[in-house]
């Protein structure tokens, strides 16, 4: 069982940057697909980014491509989300997630993952 704790959220002006961190415990996440999702008030949860283990192919929602970068540091059992050029529409609770499915052809993780962490709130002022 993987436990995930997200941190790094805060208040930032539009155009600014934040880096979110997700610390995992309970298992080694080296082969897990790790991802970030977000949910704004009154909206459904949406996929933001994901990174495979052992090689690290990355996936991004169209709305964040070119602005956000997901990375992982397996030695620290940690995943990051670097968010640049933030927009008011990026404001949401951001959740870290993990999926143990290591099948390289599986992409169902963009709809949800097996393990979910705490959220961290990102607020973007215009």
Image (tube, grey):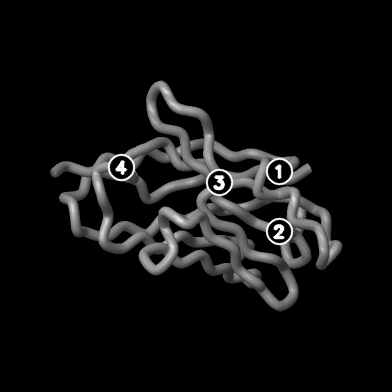
Nearest to viewer (mark 2 / mark 3): 3
Could you tell whether 41 is left or right of 102 in the image?
A: left
Could you tell whether 44 is left or right of 77 in the image?
A: left
Location of the C terminus (image quadrant): top left
Q: Secondary structure at mark 3?
A: strand
The residue pinned by badge 4 equals 89
- First-in-chain label (4 vs 3): 3
Residue most extreme to the front: 62
- Mark 4 to mark 3: distance in Å? 14 Å
The residue pinned by badge 3 equals 47
Nearest to viewer (mark 4 / mark 1): 4
Q: Residues within 10 Å of mark 4 (few under 14, many from 20)?
A: few
- Mark 3 to mark 1: distance in Å? 10 Å
Q: Are marks 3 and 1 in contact (CB under 8 Å)?
A: no
The residue pinned by badge 1 equals 113
- First-in-chain label (2 vs 4): 2
Nearest to viewer (mark 2 / mark 4): 4
- First-in-chain label (1 vs 2): 2
The residue pinned by badge 2 equals 33
């Amino acid at each position: 069982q993987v436990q995930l704790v997200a941190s790094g959220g805060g208040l930032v002006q539009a155009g600014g940057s934040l880096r979110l961190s997700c610390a995992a415990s309970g298992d080694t996440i080296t082969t897990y697909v790790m991802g970030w999702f977000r949910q704004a008030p009154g909206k459904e949860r949406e996929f933001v980014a994901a990174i495979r283990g052992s090689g690290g192919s990355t996936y991004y929602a169209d709305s964040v491509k070119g602005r956000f970068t997901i990375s992982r540091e397996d030695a620290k059992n940690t995943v990051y989300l670097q968010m640049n050029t933030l927009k008011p529409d990026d404001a949401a609770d951001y959740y870290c997630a993990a999926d143990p499915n290591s099948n390289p052809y599986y992409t169902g993780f963009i709809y949800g993952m097996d393990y979910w962490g705490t959220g961290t709130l990102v607020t973007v002022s215009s």
